[in-house]
């Protein structure tokens, strides 16, 4: 075949030269084609011997055609070549074989010519938000934000150039519109889907209900946006029907299932969030949709299925609004074989915007962790087989009615009891060995002391395995025509879960064979169902990825055409290094990576007082908690309430709340504390009562948006360092130290800085907000690393004085 129809002259010369330099051995190239299908550039990916060469997948992802030479001159594909061709066609790539002189070519698979993309003019995109644009004409007193204009341009360029964009946008920049407008323009002009992934349900709802409709009005573009939630948020009509037909032993559960059934008959969405009542998790988990229990096209309820309805709706959507957890479920499915061209959990896509990107590592760590407890194990056993007052029930009992297997009930009684004994023994041994420890990581230094636990896990592994053998025998003797009976399907689903538990038990016993995982245990205290009874204490066993960066790079940054990551807090001091290392963005080719920061337009220097009491004891002092308890009431009174107090310890929160509410009793101030009510309802009460105070920890450091007078003071009790003995944090610190790093400066401090910045950002939510931020931890001034905290937040009026001076300043400020 004429090579000049396939390759440019320069490419022919380059390949000849590379093959010659490889002494005529096989060489692997990746070619890029132009609009006419001509290969106009090649990159050398690997050199081999006279019989074979490695296909370098990292290079392959960036091209259109895989090319290698046959030194023999015989160009017909071998079996190995056919395998490469199959993989190439699966990812829309071509595959050519050439001779050493590059005078002949055999096209095994034709490449798909690149679709001509219509790039967006950055200036045109920015115009929509400019002082002369459509938004300005719709809004009185509109003020153009220069930082937002620049951010729109950068995100537009990231779409145009297929870049990985990492953009920090301070509070008030307006990042939602800054990424929605380029996303909408790109989706419309190129008929490509864009996925917007957020960290919280609140932001998902805000984007879908408010920001996206507004962005459509601004651009004048009509698009289809779909809010996609995890399937566990939707009721499964088949499972609901089964629950109605097979009542629970508990009357309250049956009544609640009846109410859900009545609601499902008329519900438009089938989403739990649309219920007018809140069913207990134990009830909802019986009737919700689960991926491994879904019968798909075989389900008798497929035409009415709420999940299928959302998926059909999403299939032709321009924008999908998801959360990080759901996106990772989709990415995992694609990495495990679903590929990137077809539908998996989500329809196919090539462009992602991560909002609240500072939380990617935590979200991925949580998603890719696995765990088991005695309750989880026994729940699955009981779903398959249980006996109550002489009555036998469960999916396996129902499935056995259509199986030719011999009666298994006596065997099931014995084997089920053996699992119960093994998992109860494991729990008892673990609770005793953990003693006063809340959680423990297994590592070389302590593994020997947990030999009893390993023995107990091995027994559980064996007991579940024997139980699974019995289940498998019943299911294997069911005729194919009965395979779609719901009970049979459910039994297979539960068996799969128990098989996963067996694998997890085995991994736990052989923890030292998995250096990329963290194995740890945590004691859980469950409140008693009946007042006066003792709480139930049990142990949860976890397997967590040590590092999510390689996974993120392979599953997200490499295969996607454009990834935009944005948040108000991605930097420590003035660089993105920490965040990039932790999330895998540091693996991205430098030419493809763009990172920029856009400062908040809000007047922090005039509107914010940032104070640190110079006479506060250090947090490791025995007097520190009593100092906090005496100081917080004074600061709250000075501000007239309207304060958010952020803690790193729930015990400290509880003691301070009790002391403060007593000290300020009768002052007209309302006190709320985390845990007293649902998070959303707590925030709503706090917003509505302008004289109230909210005591909070952990999740309230971010996602709290209370503009105006209701929140005029933020008290940060301690710098938010991770607890050093947190198992995953300790393992990552140890791994960093083994690699020659400094865990404190490279992990502890940057992680705390980002969380501190989130807490700091709770105060000013709009341009006219005024307020005070008080940090009761003077390490922020007196320790060398403190500068990393203070230089990472906007400049404001700053005080480092005794507490009395600061209290007077707070009173004067208001």
Image (tube, rainbow, N blue to C red):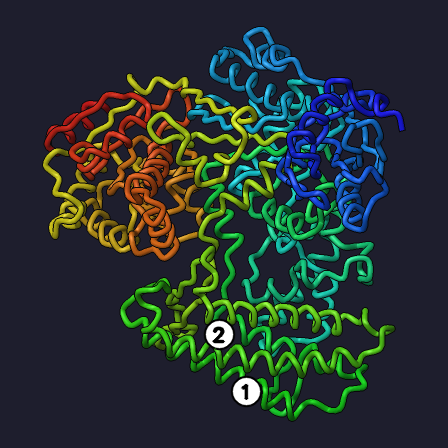
User: Quick one: which residue is furthest to the right in this view?
Assistant: 1
Seen in the image, is 599 located left or right of residue 312?
Answer: left
Mark 1 — residue?
417
Q: How crowded is mark 2: few (under 14 residues within 10 Å), some or many (20 or more)?
A: some
Q: Which residue is rendered at x = 81% and y = 33% of the image?
A: 111
Query: From the image, which quarter does the N terminus lie in?
Result: top right
The disc label shown at residue 374, or none: 2
Quarter of image, res 155: top right
Pinpoint residue 745: horizontal percent, then vertical percent: 29, 39
Is residue 526 placed above or below 749 in the rendered structure?
below
Alpha carbon distance from label 1 to label 2: 13 Å
Q: How crowded is mark 1: few (under 14 residues within 10 Å), some or many (20 or more)?
A: some
Seen in the image, is 148 located left or right of residue 308?
Answer: left
Is residue 24 placed above or below 550 in the rendered structure?
above
Is residue 331 placed above or below 250 in the rendered structure?
above
Quarter of image, res 96: top right
N-terminal of the pair, mark 1 or mark 2, is 2
Q: Which residue is rendered at x = 46% and y = 25% of the image?
A: 169
User: Quick one: which residue is furthest to the top in this view?
Assistant: 132
Seen in the image, is 254 located left or right of residue 608?
Answer: right
Count of marks placed on residues: 2
């Amino acid at each position: 075949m004429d090579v000049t129809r396939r390759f440019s002259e320069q490419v022919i010369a380059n390949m000849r030269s590379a093959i010659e330099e490889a002494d005529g051995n096989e060489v692997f190239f990746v070619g890029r084609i132009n609009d006419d299908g001509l290969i106009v550039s090649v990159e050398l990916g690997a050199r081999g011997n006279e019989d074979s060469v490695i296909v370098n997948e990292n290079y392959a992802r960036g091209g259109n055609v895989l090319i290698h030479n046959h030194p023999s001159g015989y160009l017909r594909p071998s079996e190995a070549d056919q395998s490469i061709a199959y993989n190439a066609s699966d990812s829309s790539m071509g595959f050519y074989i050439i001779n050493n002189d590059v005078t002949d070519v055999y096209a095994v698979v034709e490449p798909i010519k690149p679709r001509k993309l219509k790039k967006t003019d950055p200036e045109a995109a920015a115009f929509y938000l400019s002082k002369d644009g459509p938004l300005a004409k719709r809004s009185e007193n509109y003020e153009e934000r220069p930082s937002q204009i620049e951010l729109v341009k950068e995100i537009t360029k990231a779409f145009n150039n297929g870049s990985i964009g990492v953009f920090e946008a301070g509070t008030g920049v307006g990042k939602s519109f800054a990424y929605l407008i380029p996303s909408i323009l790109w989706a419309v002009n190129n008929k490509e889907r864009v996925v917007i992934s957020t960290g919280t349900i609140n932001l998902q709802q805000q984007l879908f209900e408010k920001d996206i409709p507004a962005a459509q009005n601004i651009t004048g573009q009509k698009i289809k946006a779909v809010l996609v939630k995890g399937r566990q948020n939707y009721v499964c009509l088949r499972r609901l029907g089964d629950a109605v037909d097979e009542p629970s032993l508990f009357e309250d559960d049956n009544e609640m299932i009846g109410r859900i059934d009545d609601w499902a008959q008329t519900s438009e969405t089938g989403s739990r969030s649309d219920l007018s009542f809140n069913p207990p998790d134990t009830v909802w988990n019986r009737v919700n949709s689960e991926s491994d229990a879904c019968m798909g096209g075989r389900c008798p309820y497929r035409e009415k299925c709420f999940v299928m309805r959302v998926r059909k709706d999403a299939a032709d959507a321009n924008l999908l609004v998801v959360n990080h957890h759901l996106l990772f479920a989709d990415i995992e499915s694609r990495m495990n074989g679903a590929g990137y061209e077809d539908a998996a959990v989500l329809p196919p896509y090539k462009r992602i915007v991560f909002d609240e990107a500072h939380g990617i590592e935590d979200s991925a760590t949580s998603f890719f962790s696995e765990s088991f407890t005695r309750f989880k194990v026994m729940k699955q056993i009981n779903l398959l087989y249980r006996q109550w007052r002489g009555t036998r029930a469960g999916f396996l009992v129902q499935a056995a009615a259509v199986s030719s297997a011999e009666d298994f009930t006596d065997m099931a009684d014995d084997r089920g009891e053996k699992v119960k004994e093994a998992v109860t023994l494991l729990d008892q041994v673990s609770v005793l060995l953990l003693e006063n420890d809340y959680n423990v990581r297994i590592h070389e230094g302590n593994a020997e002391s947990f030999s009893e636990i390993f023995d107990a896990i091995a027994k559980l592994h064996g007991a579940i395995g024997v139980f699974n053998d019995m289940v498998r025998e019943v299911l294997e003797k069911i005729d194919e025509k009965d395979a779609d009976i719901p009970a049979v399907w459910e039994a297979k689903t539960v068996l799969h879960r128990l098989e996963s538990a067996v694998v997890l038990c085995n991994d736990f016993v052989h923890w030292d064979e998995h250096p990329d995982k963290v194995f740890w245990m945590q004691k859980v205290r469950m409140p008693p169902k009946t007042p006066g009874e003792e709480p139930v204490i049990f142990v949860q066993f976890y397997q967590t990825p040590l590092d999510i960066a390689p996974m993120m790079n392979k599953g997200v940054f490499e295969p996607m055409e454009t990834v935009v990551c944005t948040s108000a807090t991605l930097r420590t001091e003035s660089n993105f290094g920490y965040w990039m290392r932790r999330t895998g963005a540091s693996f991205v080719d430098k030419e493809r990576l763009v990172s920029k920061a856009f400062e908040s337009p809000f007047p922090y220097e005039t509107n914010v007082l940032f104070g640190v009491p110079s006479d506060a004891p250090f947090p490791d002092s025995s007097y520190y908690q009593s100092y906090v308890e005496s100081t917080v009431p004074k600061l709250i009174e000075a501000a007239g309430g309207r304060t958010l107090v952020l803690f790193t310890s729930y015990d400290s929160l509880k003691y301070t709340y009790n002391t403060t509410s007593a000290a300020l009793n009768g002052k007209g101030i309302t006190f709320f504390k985390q845990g007293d009510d649902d998070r959303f309802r707590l925030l709503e009460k706090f917003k509505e009562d302008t004289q109230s105070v909210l005591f909070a920890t952990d999740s309230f450091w971010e996602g709290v948006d209370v503009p105006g007078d209701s929140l005029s003071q933020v008290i940060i009790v301690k710098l938010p360092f991770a607890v050093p003995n947190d198992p995953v944090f300790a393992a990552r610190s140890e791994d960093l130290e083994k690699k020659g790093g400094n865990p404190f400066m490279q992990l502890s401090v940057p992680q705390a800085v980002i969380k501190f910045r989130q807490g700091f950002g709770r105060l000013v939510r709009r341009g006219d907000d005024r307020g005070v931020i008080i940090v009761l931890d003077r390490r922020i001034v007196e320790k060398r690393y403190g500068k990393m905290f203070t230089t990472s937040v906007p400049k404001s009026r700053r005080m480092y004085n005794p507490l009395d001076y600061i209290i007077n300043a707070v009173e004067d400020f208001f």
